[in-house]
Image: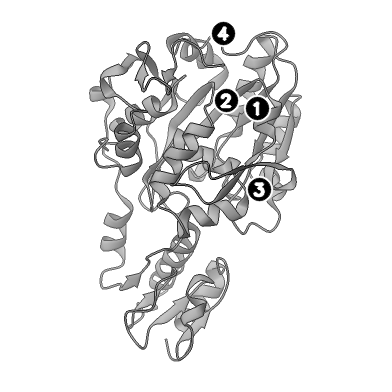
Amino acid sequence: MPSRRYWNLREGKATEMNAVAIIKSDGAYAAILPRLMGLAEAEDVVRPGDSVLIKPNLHAAQHWTTAGTTNPALVAALIEWARAKGAGRIVVADGSYYGTPRPEEVFVETGMAEAVEKAGAEWAAMPRHGYRIFPKASPHLPPEVGISQFLFACDRLLNVAVMKTHIDCLVTLGMKNLKGCIRPEDKRAFHNDVEINRAIVALNRLITPDLTIVDGTLGMEGIGPHAGRPANFGHIFASRHTPSVDAVAASAMGVGVREARMLQYAAEERMLDSDAIRVVGEDVARIRRRFERPYEVMMRELPGLRLQADGACSACKLNVIRALRENRQAGVPLPDRLVVIGNQPPAEPDALLIGRCPGEHAAGHRHLPGCPPSVARIKEFLIAPGS
C-alpha cells in the first residue's frame, strides 16, 4: 500500500511533500545508494521478507555505455541493498521494444543477465510470461491493456530508469519506463492508436512503483531513446513518487513541465504538483544542463529531409533516422522525395513508404515492409534505384 509520503490519487493532492533526492554519481552505486535512499526517505521501502521486482530500462540490446539501457552495476547494487534490508525473492524483469524477436537476448547482450546472476537474483523477459488484462481502464489507453504478472507477484516495485530524451515524448524517465511492463501489442497501440503521452499518464494510475530511480550518471541527449549520444551528467535521482522525480530530472535536463506533454498532462490530472516537491541533496539550478532535443539534431544533421511520421512508433522513427544518418555519413544523399512512416496516407504521390503501418497505402508506391524494418534493410531501400 502507498505510504503517507505518496501522492494521494484518490484525493488528487499530496498528503505530504514528495521528497526527490539528487546526489552526485560516478557509477560507484553500492557506495552512494544508502545516502540516496536516506535523502529520498526510502530506507524502509524494502522490509524483511518482501519479494522485490526491479524494473530496469532494457528496451533494446544496447550496452549501457551507449546510455540506452540501465547500467547492470546499478541493478546489482540495488539487489545487494534490498538483500541487506531482508528481501526474500528478488526478480529483475523488463520487456523490450515491440517486435523484438528474442527478448531474453536483450538481457544477455546488455550484460544484465550476468550481473543479476552474479548478484544471486533472478531475471526474466516479461514477454515470455503472462499478463493481467485490464479492459476499459481509461479512455486514454487501448480498449484493454495487459500488465506483466510480475508486478502482481511482488511486494515492492523498484523502477530504475535512465535519463534520456525521446523522439515522441521529449523525455523518457520513470513514468515512461513503466511502458516496458505492458504487452508487446499494447506498446504498439501506445504509438499508433492512442496519444502516447496521455496513455503513459493513464498507465501510471495502474502502476505505482514503491521507488523510482532516474540514473543520470550517463544520460542520453538528441535522438533518444536509442539513437542519441551519451551525456555525462554525473547525477542520480530518486523518489517514492514517480511524477515528482520525473519533473525534477526533466528540469535538470532543461525541460519544463509545460514543454513535456507527459508531465503537463500529469499536472492537469492532479498527479503532479510542483509545489508539493521537496528537492534534497544537490541544487537543480546548479546542476542543470540543457539536453539537445531530438528534432534539433535531425534539423542539424539531416537538412532537407522530408519525413511524414504521423502515427509512427519510436522504433520505426529511430531506425529510419539511423539509416538516413549512416547513409549520409557514407556519402549517400538524402532521398529527393517524401519518406513516409506511420499510419496516415502519403501526402505526395511518389512517396517512399517504410514499415508495416503505411502498407495499406502501398499501391503505386515503393514500400519496405517490417515492424520495424532493420536499419540495414532501410539503408538498402533508400539507396536502391528509384529512391
Disc 2 from disc 4: Cα separation:
13 Å
Question: Residue 195, percent across and down?
Answer: 40, 52
Say which label, 3 or 4, has the lower sequence index. Answer: 4
Depth check, mark 3 against mark 2: the one in front is 2
N-term mark: 4 or 1? 4
Question: CB of mark 2 within 8 Å of CB of mark 1?
Answer: yes
Considering the numbered disc 4 on the image, is that residue within a helix, a strand or a loop?
loop
| Residue located at (65% from left, 27% from top) | 53
Q: Earlier in the sequence, mark 1 or mark 3?
A: 1
First along the sequence among labels 2 and 1? 1
| One can see residue 221 in this view | yes
SS of the residue under disc 3: helix
Q: Residues within 10 Å of mark 3 (few under 14, many from 20)?
A: many
Separation of marks 4 and 1 at Cα, in angstroms: 15 Å
- Report the residue marked by disc 4: 44
Label drawn at residue 106: 3
- Tell me the kind of residue under disc 4: Asp
Single out the mark in the foreground, 3 or 4: 4
Res. 158 mark: 2
Above or below: residue 62 compared with residue 86: below
Mark 2 → mark 1, Cα distance in angstroms: 6 Å
- The quadrant of the image that shows the C terminus is bottom left
Amino acid type at mark 3: Val
The residue shown at (45%, 29%) is 214
Q: What's the residue at 60%, 33% (across, down)?
A: 55
Q: Is residue 321 above or below residue 96?
A: below
Q: Which quadrant would the N terminus be assigned to in this image?
A: top right
What residue did someone put label 1 on? 53
Element type at mark 1: strand
Give 217 or 309, whichever is nearer the viewer.
309
- Residue that lies at the very extreme toward the front in this rendered image: 136
Circle 2 sits in a helix, a strand or a loop, which is it? strand
